[in-house]
Image (cartoon, rainbow, N blue to C red):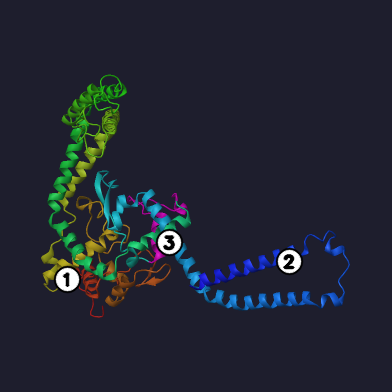
């Protein structure tokens, strides 16, 4: 409202001043042939007439205009500055969304940052993991400060699928792009109530993971055995793939010749031949599915033209042939790695490092309360194991002993009790997290990488985690002192 008034007043003043100048020029009627600075000066009698009056009136009007306009402009300045800030923030969020989309953040962290999974080579066993667990980002600012979150984006996490994205860490994003991405992350953060509601689902999921561990490991072993079998069968399959790829490419290359009933650029005979090639490729397990091309329809599958479907089929068969060729040429090294991975999985199935004896934990640490023991372990696995249990994110088959350390330090063998002499100090540390350069516990120095859980977990749940970590089943020392 004020901005519109100011603009209107300025416009009217400009129009009035322009009219005054035009009027003054027209009255002179082109008589000033001699430059004004070379003509004779006006006498006092000439000046002290209506000419002076007009000048004084113009000055008074201009002063009055400024006296009114400046306060009005000032009153709207705060709103204008807030509007600029809002515009800058909106533009930054839009750029952050472009970064999110361009670099495929949702491919790992899920749409809306709900968490997801990504294929990755597990570093210890060299087994390909189909779904390395990527953390949720829709609650990241409850766990980390903005600068701490920025650190992970810039430098990534070594030994995980999370690469360094910032220039300082060797990635492609400059500082402004990282800040824009952070601003975009802020647009889909959960409310604290929603984050607290998620506790039960996270605990249930972590416990279900343990309950289904044997089946999950057996499935991983079966997948590895299938991989070994596919490597062994590759020399037999390669000639079939190469033959189909060559035939498919030829049919596509000559597809413009002959009768074309639907006028889509693919002859009827080419569509029939490519359909048959697709059937053979699926039967040979070269590809998962193939199109059925109808010579009387330009779009045999709704939403996809026959021409595009044909090109996709040829590309898939050619890619599979190239993949098989690579496997055959590197069969020795691939087989050795696959065999080693199978041995690691079989050993994991026997060792069962993920296993937790809930009744024993309940008896030794929770005074026999099995419900508290299960919840404490579910909370630890759901919120802490990603950093403090090596291999946890890769899957149950690759997990080491609970709390044995990973990105974060080991918490076994009494380390929790050694670092925090008093339980209350450890509870406070889990609530607030670490601060870069600030001391914690007996001799710890924070790096800012330990998140605080006070905004996403209840006080009671944090106390259960601390009780589990300080209990006999993990400390190897005994029950903590009464002072603790």
Q: Residue at x 16, y 62 (%)?
A: 204
Corner quadrant of residue 300: top left
Magenta span of residues = 145-172
Q: In this view, does 236 lie above or below 343?
A: above
The percent position of residue 345, horizontal first and vertical second, equals 19, 46
Circle 3 residue: 90
Q: Which mark is residue 108?
A: none
- Whether residue 179 is visible here, answered yes or no, is no
Q: Residue 365 carries which label?
A: 1
Q: Does the magenta stretch include residue 112?
A: no
Name the element at disc 1. Answer: helix
Q: Residue at x 73, y 77 (%)?
A: 56
Distance between mark 1 and mark 2 Cα atoms: 98 Å
Q: Is residue 152 magenta?
A: yes
Q: Which is closer to the viewer, label 1 or label 2?
A: 2
Q: Which of 160 and 142 is in front in this view?
A: 142
Corner quadrant of residue 29: bottom right
Label whose residue precedes the other's in the sequence (1 or 2): 2
Q: Which is closer to the viewer, label 2 or label 3?
A: 2
Corner quadrant of residue 8: bottom right
């Amino acid at each position: 409202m004020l901005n519109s008034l100011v603009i209107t007043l300025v416009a009217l003043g400009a129009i009035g001043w322009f009219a005054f100048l035009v009027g003054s020029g027209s009255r002179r009627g082109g008589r000033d042939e001699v430059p004004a600075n070379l003509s004779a000066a006006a006498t006092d009698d000439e000046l002290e007439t209506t000419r002076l009056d007009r000048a004084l009136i113009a000055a008074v009007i201009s002063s009055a205009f400024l006296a009114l306009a400046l306060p009005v402009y000032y009153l709207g300045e705060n709103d204008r500055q807030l509007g600029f800030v809002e515009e800058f923030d909106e533009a930054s969020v839009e750029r952050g969304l472009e970064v999110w989309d361009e670099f495929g953040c949702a491919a790992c962290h899920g749409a809306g940052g709900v968490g997801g999974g990504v294929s990755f080579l597990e570093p210890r066993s060299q087994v390909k993991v189909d779904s390395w667990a990527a953390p949720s980002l829709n609650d990241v600012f409850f766990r980390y400060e903005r600068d701490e979150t920025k650190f992970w984006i810039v430098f990534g996490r070594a030994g995980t699928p999370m690469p360094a994205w910032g220039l300082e860490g060797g990635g492609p994003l400059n500082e402004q792009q990282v800040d824009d991405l952070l601003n975009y992350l802020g647009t889909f953060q959960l409310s604290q109530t929603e984050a607290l509601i998620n506790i039960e689902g996270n605990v249930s999921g972590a416990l279900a993971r343990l309950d289904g561990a044997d089946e999950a490991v057996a499935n991983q072993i079966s997948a590895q055995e299938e991989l070994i079998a596919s490597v062994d069968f590759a020399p037999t399959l390669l000639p079939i793939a190469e033959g189909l790829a060559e035939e498919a490419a030829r049919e596509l290359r000559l597809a413009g010749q002959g009768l074309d009933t639907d006028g889509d650029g693919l002859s009827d005979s080419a569509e029939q031949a490519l359909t048959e090639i697709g059937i053979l490729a699926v039967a040979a397990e070269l590809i998962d599915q193939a199109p059925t091309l109808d010579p009387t329809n330009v779009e045999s599958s709704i939403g996809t033209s026959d021409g595009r479907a044909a090109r996709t089929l040829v590309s898939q068969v050619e890619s599979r042939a190239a993949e098989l060729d690579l496997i055959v040429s590197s069969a020795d090294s691939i087989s050795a790695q696959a065999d080693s991975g199978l041995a690691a999985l079989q050993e994991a199935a026997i060792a069962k490092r993920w296993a937790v004896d809930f009744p024993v934990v309940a008896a030794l640490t929770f005074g026999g309360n099995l419900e508290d023991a299960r919840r404490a372990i579910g909370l630890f696995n759901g919120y802490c194991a990603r950093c403090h249990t090596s291999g946890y994110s890769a899957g149950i088959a690759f997990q080491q002993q609970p709390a044995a350390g990973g990105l974060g330090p080991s918490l076994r063998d009494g380390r929790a009790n050694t670092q925090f002499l008093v339980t209350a100090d450890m509870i406070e540390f889990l609530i607030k997290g670490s601060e870069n350069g600030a001391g914690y516990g007996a001799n710890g120095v924070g790096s800012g990488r330990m998140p605080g859980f006070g905004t996403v977990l209840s006080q009671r749940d944090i106390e259960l985690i601390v009780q589990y970590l300080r209990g006999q089943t993990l400390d190897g020392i005994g029950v903590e002192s009464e002072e603790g």
